[in-house]
Image (tube, rainbow, N blue to C red):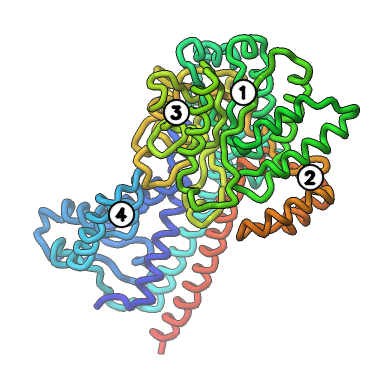
């Protein structure tokens, strides 16, 4: 007789939780040599747990409690093979892994796998000749023995897994993170597991400015892939580069994603104006930014305001200036928003050709910097074949699951392997080519959705080079700037608000009512770790609740057999 539906659900939950804690131990023991990714690692552990349990005891831990197990109705000589095929194709973790465990979720592959998995699940009894059945009822003494064993083993596993996870976390994380934000620390790759990256960095790191100028010897246009728009320190690096005498003398042009191309003359007029005080500069710049929006109601990022202000002081009264040229459109009419990348590229290309500009630095955020179809970088590379390079600035990927729900939660690139490698050398500010590096061989996991074909490419095919500037803990974001919501600016924004559906100026007024908002890099970069730790604590609580439920079931079962 088969277990009832409730029993089957509890068996599934028990085995899933058992595998989850088992994975923590396996991952912790393997951490020194290899970092096992969480989701796929857990699913593979679950599948292996099923196979080993059935081969050795003919039942899983959950089935042991409910006095159930598998019955083989086929040829005993082929049992191991049939069992292996059954669990690798029909079990819940196997189906999840087959459908979603790929780096690239190909629509064709998924459409093929769905009916195949469904047919195997429906007919698995006939195909594999293996079923799960209830065994004869236990006597009260035997039932008590089963529950006692179940409870002891499960509790021991939870405690052991938690201890291993804590040790692994402490051993693989930066001391600052452990001391200041312990809940933001999760198991990370060990220093030993990233040795090939460390060995490369020891002999292949260049000064950032020197590296970029070397690129300009080979390419005419270099695209910098900006971090999160709000991140502050990246604009210190950009400012240092564009104010380098070598840049002003031989390049001199910066195109930016932020800002409307129609406002270039207005910014030039601002730069030409003599202001008597720093406050006058800030008030006029805040007014300029209010009128110079692109696809948002308000652009409150402190770094952009500070950069334009610093460039005002650098360019003002200079004969040889750095030309700041915006490339976006004022998107009050959003009917062509899907063509934004091609429009930005057209604005850049037309300016380069009409003004006879031979070289330029182009600052684009995330995918806009890619040279793959549909992105601004792609259109630029087609207009200037072999003359466009793109460089990634160290930051993070984005959680694909969170992105699908409308949130942007950073997660470390390559599970944190790169960050750990730089930590081993003291987090140097440096740059290098992806080609010929172990970094370049890693699969691309930047800001992309899982069904984007570029998931199948290595980093060296997506970016020319890489810049490491400031560790995640040194980075920070900031919103707001002086005079951002002065009465005249608010009046302008209210007019804009009426033309842009779904945007609220009141939100920004509430958010910025106490002034500039800063968020430390740890809180930004390791937010996913905090979520992961909350999930782990939740799983522990769920496991304890399950033990309580099993206790109640066991008590009622023993009482029933005693009558």
SS at badge 3: helix
- According to the picture, the residue beneath numbered tag 2 turns out to be 484
Separation (CA) of disc 4 from disc 2: 53 Å
CB within 8 Å, label 3 to label 2: no
Please tell me how crowded label 1 is: few (under 14), some (14-19), or many (20+) other residues with Cα within 10 Å. Answer: some
Q: Is residue 177 left or right of residue 92?
A: right
Disc with the residue nearer the chain's start (3 vs 2): 3
**Residue 257 circle label:** none
Disc with the residue nearer the chain's start (3 vs 4): 4
- According to the picture, the residue beneath numbered tag 1 turns out to be 427
Residue at the bottom extreme of this rendering: 563
Residue shown at the point (34%, 55%) measured from the top left: 96
Looking at the image, residue 175 lies above or below residue 352: below
Q: Is residue 189 left or right of residue 129?
A: right
Looking at the image, residue 260 lies above or below residue 133: above
- According to the picture, the residue beneath numbered tag 4 turns out to be 94
């Amino acid at each position: 007789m088969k277990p009832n539906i409730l029993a089957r659900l509890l068996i599934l939950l028990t085995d899933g939780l058992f595998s989850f804690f088992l994975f923590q131990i396996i991952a912790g023991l393997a951490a020194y040599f290899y970092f096992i990714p969480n989701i796929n690692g857990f699913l593979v552990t679950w599948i292996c747990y099923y196979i080993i349990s059935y081969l050795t005891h003919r039942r899983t831990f959950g089935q042991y409690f409910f006095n159930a197990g598998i019955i083989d109705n086929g040829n005993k000589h082929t049992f191991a093979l049939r069992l292996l095929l059954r669990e690798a194709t029909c079990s819940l973790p196997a189906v999840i892994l087959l459908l979603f465990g790929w780096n690239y979720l190909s629509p064709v592959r998924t459409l093929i796998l769905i009916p195949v998995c469904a047919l195997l699940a429906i007919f698995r009894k006939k195909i594999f000749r293996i079923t799960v059945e209830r065994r004869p009822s236990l006597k009260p003494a035997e039932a008590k023995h089963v529950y006692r064993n179940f409870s002891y083993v499960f509790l021991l596993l939870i405690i052991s897994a938690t201890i291993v996870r804590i040790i692994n976390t402490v051993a693989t994380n930066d001391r600052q993170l452990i001391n200041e934000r312990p809940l933001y620390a999760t198991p990370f790759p060990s220093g030993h597991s990233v040795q090939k990256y460390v060995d490369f960095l020891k002999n292949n790191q260049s000064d950032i400015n020197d590296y970029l100028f070397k690129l300009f010897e080979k390419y005419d246009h270099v695209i910098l892939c900006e971090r999160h728009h709000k991140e502050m320190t990246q604009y210190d690096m950009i400012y240092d580069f564009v104010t380098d005498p070598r840049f002003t003398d031989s390049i001199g042009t910066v195109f930016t994603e932020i800002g409307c191309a129609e406002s270039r003359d207005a910014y030039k007029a601002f730069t030409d104006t003599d202001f008597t005080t720093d406050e006058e500069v800030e008030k006029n710049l805040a007014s300029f930014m209010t009128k110079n929006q692109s696809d948002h109601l308000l652009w409150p990022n402190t770094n952009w305001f500070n950069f334009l202000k610093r460039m005002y002081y650098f360019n003002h009264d200079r004969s040889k200036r750095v030309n700041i040229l915006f490339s976006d459109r004022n998107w009050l009419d959003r009917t062509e928003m899907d063509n934004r990348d091609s429009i930005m590229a057209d604005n850049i290309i037309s300016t380069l050709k009409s003004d006879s500009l031979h070289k330029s630095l182009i600052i684009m955020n995330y995918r806009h910097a890619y040279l793959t179809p549909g992105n601004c970088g792609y259109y630029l590379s087609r207009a200037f074949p072999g003359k466009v390079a793109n460089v990634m600035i160290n930051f993070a990927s984005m959680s694909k699951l969170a992105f699908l729900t409308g949130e942007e939660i950073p997660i470390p690139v390559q599970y944190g392997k790169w960050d750990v490698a730089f930590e081993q050398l003291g987090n140097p500010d440096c740059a290098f080519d992806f080609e010929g590096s172990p970094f370049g061989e890693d699969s691309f996991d930047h800001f992309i959705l899982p069904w984007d074909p570029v998931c199948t490419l290595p980093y060296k095919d997506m970016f020319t080079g890489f810049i490491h500037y400031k560790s995640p803990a040194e980075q920070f974001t900031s919103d707001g700037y002086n005079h951002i919501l002065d009465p005249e600016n608010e009046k302008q924004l209210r007019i804009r608000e009426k033309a842009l559906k779904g945007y609220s100026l009141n939100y920004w007024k509430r958010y910025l009512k106490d002034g500039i908002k800063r968020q430390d890099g740890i809180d930004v970069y390791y937010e996913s770790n905090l979520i992961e730790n909350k999930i782990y604590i939740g799983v522990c609580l769920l496991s304890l609740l399950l033990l309580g439920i099993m206790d109640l079931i066991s008590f009622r079962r023993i009482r029933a057999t005693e009558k």
